[in-house]
Amino acid sequence: MSVTISPLNIVLDKQNPRFVVINDNSEATIRKYMSMYEDVCQLAEGINNNRGLLLGERIVVIEENDQYVVMEGNRRTVALQFLLNRDLIPDGFQHKVPFVSNETLANIKEIEIDVAPNRQYAIALMAKRHIQGVKDWKPLAKKQFFASMFNDGSTVEELSMRTGIKVSEIRKDIRDYKLLLKVSSEYKQEHPEFDEDLITYKIDPFLRIFSASQQINGVSRKPSDILKMKYDLQENTGSELPNDIFSSILQQIFESTIVNKTISTRNTLFDVPGVRTLIESLEHANRNTAEGSTPEGSTPEGSTPEGSTPEGSTPEGSTPEGSTPEGSTPEGSTPEGSTPEGSTPEGSTPEGSTPEGSTPEGSTPKGSTPKGSTPKGSTPEGSTPEGGTPEGGTLEGGTPEGGTPEGSTPGGSAAGGGPAPGGLAPGSFFEHISWNKLSPSNNDHIGLIVALNELYSMSRNSTKGKSMKIYESFPVGAGMLLRTAYEQALILQLKKTGIWGSLLNQYTMPMLSNIESHIKSNITIVLPLPNMRSAFNLILNSHSRDFLNSNVHKPGMIRTTSSTLEGLASGGMVALIQLIIDNV
């Protein structure tokens, strides 16, 4: 059916996929949106130049609540309304719409339009025309269209039949839109200061993070596999990761791609600040939990129930007559010209000492096994695992390097005999800091690299002959290094953001207090990420600089302890330095 009507009497469709993403989808707001994003002012100029609509450009409407609601031709309707009534043109766009000529006015006062029998019929027509070529919608509008139709009860297969679009493409569009809408809503709840409309988002960087393959140790992996993503029957996105971890990762991705726009389509998942750390920490925790658990009533791999003897072995302290365990040296002997690792030449003992737990030459210590036949995962009584620390020298919060954590099993051990690197607990100081994005060939990076390299070593290694880590034994020196690393990180960030020069105009050699004040005055420029600003403010509020300065200039007036250093590190220092490096 066709009717002749004035364009001013046609009502814009608030349910149109392009408009439902607008917070306020009144007709006035829709007209402004179309002026900003749909080139409707340019279309009005074209209609005026052509003296009316061209053939084949009939508008399609449906009749709802005694009104004609436009289903196909929203841009043309708005353009005609602008030409007929300039009061409808939004502020700031009047100069873009020409004054209508008399000839055009005569041709557009009333136009013939087609009336569709119902909305479903019109939607099918609209989908075919728009999604297949007449006027391509923006990607977000297409995704929202399919999600809206799916939520209203249409199946993916039905949408495919109506539009000619593949089922897989439609399903992906629905999932993309639902995920984006969910993450955006959650982010806005936590950050009310971010009030950007969904229609203004540049969604390609956000979506590409979930599709661009990530290289891990030379192996290409899909982000959906790394994040263990899954979908329910309503095409909502979930994950097998813990909810808080998955939610945190999604928020980081949204903030980096949509809010701060620091991540582009050229980046991959692990380029998003904090994501790699969360994933690797979780994998280490899962691996160590698995290694540390043994089903009730079972025996850890490589061990033997009390009082029993491993299959194929001999009773405690004995060896079958005339035999030697495969791969070992006859009891008490040493290959010609060699000395057992960690021992002294035959017949000698370090001056004035006798190794604890040693036995006369040629005998085997109680409960031990000749070299080469030690049961998997066990260590002879009184010995130290290769690469471990002396008795009592277990690193705080960990195990001797190459050893096995208490309560864990050797199963899944690394090639060196110990568990895979990492652990359940977060670092106490700088043992988890990573500076692989810094380049030794870049003069701006060298200062921070040098400081972090030493802090890392002091956090990972123990003082020789003691169980204490180096920073625990030398807290004053470690505090000086911490101040250096902090200062170098701030200088690097000032240089990266182009603010360092303005500071040098004020001070020839800026002090740390000058650097902090300058950053505070330009904080949104120097520290664009909210997490950066949060960490920096924690450091300022705890007066960390004052303490570190006193440690350098007045070490006799304060007492720097390892606990103090750990508090400074966990109070924002490590987080800020790592964020600066990750976004270098």
Image (cartoon, rainbow, N blue to C red):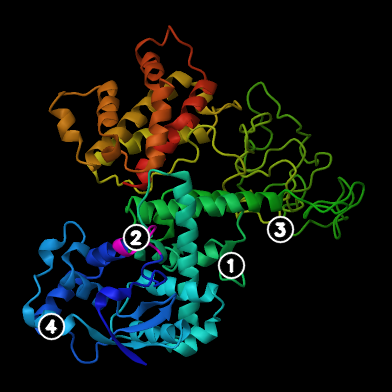
Closer to us: 102 or 299: 102
The Cα–Cα distance between marks 2 and 4, rounded to whole angstroms, is 40 Å
In the rendered image, which residue does mark 1 sit on?
Answer: 230
1 or 4: tag closer to the N-terminus: 4
Residue 570 drawn at (x, y percent) = 50, 31
From mark 1 to mark 3, how far is it between C-alphas? 50 Å
Residue 509 occupies quadrant:
top left
Whichever of callouts 2 and 4 sits on the residue coming sooner in the sequence is 4
At 43% from the left and 56% from the top, the residue drawn is: 270
Magenta range is: 21-28
Relative to 244, residue 346 above or below:
above
Q: Is residue 178 magenta?
A: no
Q: Which residue is mark 2?
A: 201
Mark 1 vs mark 3: give the one in front: 1
The three-letter amino acid code for the residue at tag 1 is Lys
Determine the secondary structure under disc 2.
loop
**Left or right: residue 198 compared with residue 496:** right
Image marks 1 and 3: residues in contact by CB distance under 8 Å: no
Checking the image for residue 106, the label placed there is 4
The foreground one among 143 and 393 is: 143
Residue 52 visible in the picture = no
Between the C-alphas of marks 4 and 3, the distance is 103 Å
Element assignment for label 4:
helix
State if disc 4 and disc 1 touch (CB < 8 Å). no
Which residue corresponds to mark 3?
327
